[in-house]
Image (cartoon, rainbow, N blue to C red):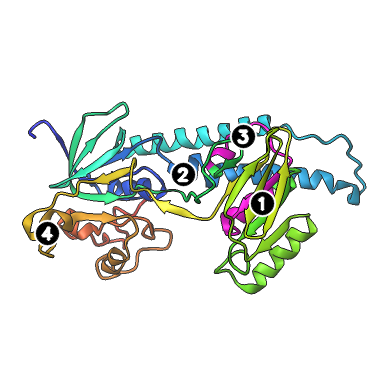
Amino acid sequence: MANEEEFDVVVIGGGPGGYATALYGAAAGLSVAIVERDKVGGTCLHRGCIPAKEFLETAAVRRTIEGSKEFGIDVSGVALDFARSQERKQAVVDKLWKGLQGLLKGRKVTTFIGTGTLKEGRRVEVLDGPDAGKAITGANVVLAAGSVPHILPGFEVDGRWVMTSDEFLDLQKLPASVAVVGGGVVGCEFASLLADLGSKVTILEALDAILPGCDEDVVRLIVRSFKKRGIDIVTGVKVESHTPSADGTVTTVKAGEQSWDGEAKEGPLRQQQPGADHRRHGGAREDRRREAAGRHGREDPWRAHVRAVGHRAVERRVSRRQLGGVPRRGRAVHPAAPVPLRDVRRDHVGPDRKGIAPWLTS
């Protein structure tokens, strides 16, 4: 439509991959728009890395205080006010979020709040939120919709007995006992901080060892640390379901012939950390209609300029030769930026006479 805004790059999703792409493109002189369904910063800033690291710091402080007697400092009456820790966490998140908003605005990146839907012709419609009903067009579209927690059958999230990391990060009071389903990096991270904050923790892992993909030496070190801190690790079990008791104080997690009971003041927490799924609905959706050429196996012309963030094919195309040589130290290309600038800018993007590419100044 004639009144629709047009941009060089439209990014669907404002998480670390999406906003890094937007800032990278803006530094190259491109007009860039972000469509984000919630708040820029994504899972990492609001429901993942940053909140978790704040709680890890809280756990480290508590652990240090409890171990201070070894250094001749006797501290008694240590108590955790998790609601206060939540306030500090939110203050940290809000500060970073406002800083990111200012950075995007300063780089002249246009932000649309709502669910982005990709249509034919690289047209993106905003379905809901404050900018619902708006439509924009991008010469290039980057899909960076992120991921959501993977939900196991029989462990539907209810916010009381079963939670993902999303719900846990909003708790006001910690439970006395926790079963963490999944012994990957995220599961172990939450198991560690919960144990240090005073909860009894059991890790249930389907594989033969926790932290699959990590070096065996690292796994042995972490297992030793966990056992020393009272964290139970059960491997080779596939959980099936959980059954709350009639009085609402105990739930039993079943895995074949084995079972584990847990109880807490406000009900035990069964935290799922088995992995993550790509966001297919609610963050970025693609219209399934295709041109006849696409249905017969040939790529639709408009799809040639639609890329997923961090796509390896793009990494291969952005070579040293395209950059006009190796950029000066400290001017490296951001690894999350997926759009080949030669294709987008349609001009030479090599360095200036001082050997510095003008769009690599951030």
Q: Residue at x 14, y 49 (%)?
A: 289
Residues at marks 1 and 4, CA–CA distance in whole angstroms: 47 Å
On whether residue 317 falls in the magenta region, the answer is no
Q: Residue furthest bottom?
A: 216
Q: Earlier in the sequence, mark 1 or mark 4?
A: 1
Q: Nearer the viewer, residue 194 or 246?
A: 246
Q: Residue at x 64, y 31 (%)?
A: 172
Query: Which mark is drawn over residue 268?
Result: none
Locate the N terminus and report the quarter of the image it occupies. top left
Give the crowd class for mark 4: few <14, some 14-19, many >=20 residues within 10 Å.
few
Asked if labels 3 and 2 touch by Cβ distance under 8 angstroms, the answer is no
Residue designated by label 4: 294
The kind of residue tagged 2 is: Thr
Q: Nearer the viewer, residue 351 or 296?
A: 296
The kind of residue tagged 4 is: Gly
Horizontal side of 204 relative to 111 (left or right) equals: right
Q: Is residue 358 above or below residue 40?
A: below
Residues at marks 1 and 2, CA–CA distance in whole angstroms: 19 Å
Q: Earlier in the sequence, mark 1 or mark 2?
A: 2
Give the crowd class for mark 2: few <14, some 14-19, many >=20 residues within 10 Å.
many
On whether residue 181 falls in the magenta region, the answer is yes
Residue designated by label 2: 43
Kindly report which numbered mark, 2 or 4, lies closer to the viewer in this rendering: 4
The picture places residue 236, in percent across and down from the top left corner, at: 62, 66
The kind of residue tagged 3 is: Leu
The kind of residue tagged 1 is: Ala
Residue designated by label 3: 171
